[in-house]
Image (cartoon, helix red, strand yellow):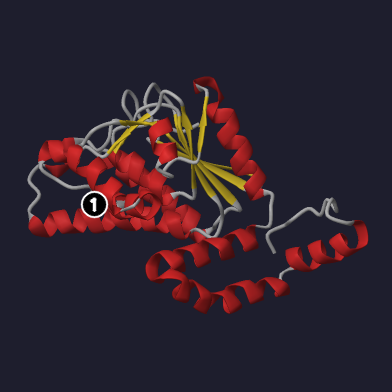
Amino acid sequence: MTDSPARLERDGALATLTLDHPPLNLFDRAMLDAVRAAVADLDADPPRGLLVRAEGRVVSGGVDVSVFRDLDGTTGAALWADMLEMAATIERLPCPTVFAAHALTLTAAFEIALACDLIVAARSARFGLVETVVGLTPSMGGPQRLADRAGSGRARELVMTGDLYDAETLERWNVVNVVCDDGEVDERSRALAGRLADGPTRAHDATKQIVRAWSAGGNAAADAIVPTVSGALFDTDDTRRAIAAFLADGPRHGTAYEGR
């Protein structure tokens, strides 16, 4: 165990990053430092799957506003660059990433969720980017990643109103992937993350690269990288073994993927 506000644990193929900074899991300086360190660890030694979750009655009450005290344009820009890089590093990890939202999920935590591949949410969970209350706009990647998932109009609505949105609404908007009963979030998110971590993670990484290319430049940009990123899969042990097993034993070949 550790007293760190955010702890990173590894169990075989799956890594779990847990926010645990009672009472509200606020992103104060200690939390930011802890998440930064965990993300650097993940970047240096990527797992085959990542689950991001939280302890406590909320996922996070957002950023501790005292972090913004005394910032000016220069120091504020440096803070946003640092926080944005944390989210972008999670997004670039060469493995599937799942965010579990069991309750209220505000600002920085919501932006980290949007940097993950999939979001599993409790039916009673609420989400918000509420930076307008202190005259700011979300700057850890939230607006652009919301626009990517839900469209630019919905992104402007959510950010400009500063309202809270329930999980089922965000599922309809294609922001949340799975909505489940409140007591099932941990089990469902762990099962999903574990299943993906045990799968063909090199192929999952190729999928992520293709989707990111589409997001940046449309079909033409995605098509341009497909031969390289998908072609490289034929040189991986996982693909070679799975193809051979499929031909020998059929679609239920039961090949154990190893991420190589």
| 25 left or right, relative to 195 | left
Residue 158's x, y, as percent?
Answer: 26, 41
| Left or right position of 192 against 104 | right
Single out the residue that lies furthest toward the right. Answer: 248
Q: Residue at x 24, y 38 (%)?
A: 63
Q: Position of residue 219 (x, y in %)?
A: 47, 71
SS label for mark 1: loop
Q: Amino acid at mark 1?
A: Ser
Locate the C terminus by quadrant: bottom right
Q: Is residue 74 above or below residue 161?
A: below
Tally of numbered discs = 1
Residue that carries the numbered disc 1 in the rendered image = 139
| Residue nearest the viewer, comparing 216 with 18 | 216
Residue beneath the point at 54% across and 58% down = 45
| Quadrant in which residue 161 is drawn | top left
Residue at the spot 59% in from the left edge and 36% down from the top edge: 190
The answer to whether residue 127 is above or below residue 159 is: above
